[in-house]
Amino acid sequence: MTQRKIAATVLAQLLGGWTGRGPAYLNLAHSLQHLILDGRLPLAAYLPSERTLAEALGLSRNTIKASYNVLQDEGFLYLRPGVRGVIRLPAGASTPGVPLPPLTHPHLLDFASAALPAPEGLIHEAYTHALTALPTYLPTHGYLPLGLPALRSAVAARYAARGLPTTAEQVVITFGAQHALSLIVRVFTSPGDRVLVDQPTYPHALDALRGASCRIVPVALTPEGWDPDAWAAAARQTSPRLAYLIPDFHNPTGHLMPDAVRTQITRLCRETRTLLVVDETLTDLALDVPVPSPFAGNDRYDTVVSIGSMSKSFWGGLRLGWIRAPRDVAERLGAARSSVDLGTPVVEQLAGAWLLQDPGPFLERRQQQLREQREVLTEQLNLQLPEWIYRLPEGGLSLWVTLPQPIGPALVAQATRFGLRLTAGERFAHDGLLARQLRLPFTRPAAELHEGVTRLATLYRELVSDDSRRNDPRVNVQLDMY
């Protein structure tokens, strides 16, 4: 198995200004722990040798050796004589595949689901039109593995209107984005194939890849977004079969990928013969910038397969998504789908086709609603939790918040006591990291956002108090790492 290696120059850049009061070896060890827990350093990767890191940081080898020994003693590094140290997590730390908290109580304020309720009246009207059109299809068997022609044409027309020529034959209708990804993974990967993903990323994408027994290769996002050099290093070291990314208002960080980076990653995937799967389910939810152009507009070599959905912009209950791909790929996906299911329900597809006839006015109202709710959430965070750090996303549905302490799992565990439903950052990581992060959606009404932050602030103050640290073992597990 090919194992990733962290170059000393790359690690020095990631560390940034790591020095502080106290012994240098302890400051360095604690800074490395932060990088590991925040997902910036991948698990099972090799750290640089003592000599090369000492040269890169301008330190003695003894200082590096002492730092590595601290990491080993605290469970973050596996060391053997003559072999580079391998990054790991301490025994008993978070594990991958953390489930979303269940909706077990109807009165919980839901800060876990980044999804909007149905727009008043519009979905009902869409189904009314669908039922009116349904008699035309009743004489047929109703099985449409590739999708209803009217909806496929409507999706293709939207791509074309945004600058990417597309025909209906290039579109496959699915039960949403997760179903689309699962179908792609089933057709184009085999157990054991490596798949590149962002770290953090969409949790259900990780679930789909684990379910297919793929080897997930996380590539950490920086505070500014994607690092093309890190993507290139991961691709060339691991020879992935497939890559999955969310370039538009990334879930959960909200980042928007620059055009230059899109071109670089597309070229990289072409050179390494990696199928690039691009999730554009949040594209329509641009709040401060124009709606991005389709990612596949950079692709001249059939490297990119695009996923879209109506769940985030319209309503999740529609269960409508799609795959936009080269025609031969679309036909292959449709043929493979028939062994699992025979297509998406006709009524929902008719409703979706009607909604996509002229979505502009509705989407503008959606965007304005989200701007207002984002403002309420950020105002309350600034007022009640000023020590929490976030960047304002230019679109999407949520904030990605960094906490002063790695107590995200403890917040989630205690949230129901305060009438909240939360999702910890570890849910968005392949390897159980990101304990200092939370995703906070701004998809609820203003009054709920205000009340939710008030409850969250009360919970947080309780957890960080001395008494709470002694009484909550989950907090102790995370704080003891430092």
Image (cartoon, rainbow, N blue to C red):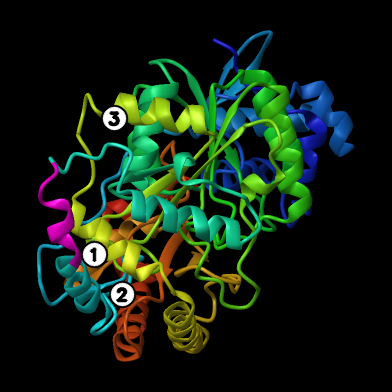
Q: Secondary structure at mark 2?
A: helix
Q: Is residue 388 magenta?
A: no
Q: CA distance from mark 3 to mark 2?
A: 46 Å
Classified by dominant secondary structure, the portion drawn in magenta counts as: helix
Q: What x and y, as percent, mark residue 97?
A: 32, 39
Question: In this image, 106 relative to 74: left or right?
Answer: left
Asked whether residue 311 is in view, the answer is yes
Q: CA distance from mark 1 to mark 2?
A: 8 Å
Q: What x and y, as percent, mark residue 434?
A: 47, 50
Of the numbered discs 3 and 1, the one sitting upstream in the chain is 3
Q: Are marks 3 and 2 in contact (CB under 8 Å)?
A: no
Q: Is residue 135 magenta?
A: yes
In the rendered image of this protein, does residue 157 appear above or below residue 387?
Answer: above
In the rendered image of this protein, does residue 254 appear above or below residue 149?
Answer: below
Picture quarter with the N terminus: top right
* Residue picked out by circle 2: 459
* Residue picked out by circle 3: 337
* Residue picked out by circle 1: 414
Q: Amino acid at mark 2?
A: Leu
Q: Which residues are magenta?
A: 133-140
Q: Amino acid at mark 3?
A: Arg
Q: Secondary structure at mark 1?
A: helix
